[in-house]
Image (tube, grey):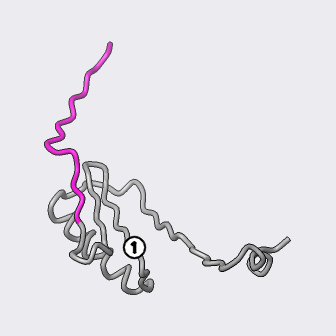
Amino acid sequence: GSTQQTVNRPWIGLRLESEDKKWIVQTDYQGVVLSRLRPYCGWDEFVSQGLKVWRAYCECLEPSEIQRLSVRSINVIEIKSFADVRGYLRH
């Protein structure tokens, strides 16, 4: 009654960086991640780069389905002194 499934994974993953080290692409058999480091760009530039990465990923690995698509944005608030915190937070 038991079955055994073998998955052939010829490689573990890849990490690519742009020459200026602002763009990072990480990929493995489960998916692809695009990251942008400081100075951050606008949404239009990020989407443009993301589509290039996605097209290359699909062309190379030919995924049969998409199980998850997500976007994570990290907000950075630079506060010069502790006394300035109240101006940024609501009670």
Verify whether residue 62 appears in magenta: no
Q: Position of residue 30 (x, y in %)?
A: 31, 49
The residue tagged 1 is: 37
Q: What x and y, as percent, mark residue 5?
A: 25, 27
Toward which corner of the image does residue 89 lie, by quadrant? bottom right
Which stretch appears magenta?
1-16
Nearer the observer, 77 or 4: 77
Above or below 1: residue 35: below
Q: Is residue 9 magenta?
A: yes
Residue in view at x 74 percent, y 73 percent: 82
Q: Nearer the viewer, residue 91 or 54?
A: 91
Residue at 29% across, 59% down: 26
Q: Quadrant of the N terminus?
A: top left
Dominant secondary-structure state across the stretch colored magenta:
loop
Quarter holding the C terminus is bottom right
Tell me where residue 44 sits by quadrant: bottom left
Q: Which quarter of the picture shows residue 35?
A: bottom left
Residue drawn at 53 percent across, 69 percent down: 74
Residue 61 versus residue 5 in the image, above or below: below
Mark 1: secondary structure: loop
Q: Residue at x 30, y 67 (%)?
A: 24
Query: Hey, what amino acid is under mark 1?
Result: Leu
Q: Is residue 46 left or right of residue 62?
A: right
Query: How many other residues sit within 10 Å of disc 1, few (<14), some (14-19) or many (≥20)?
Result: few
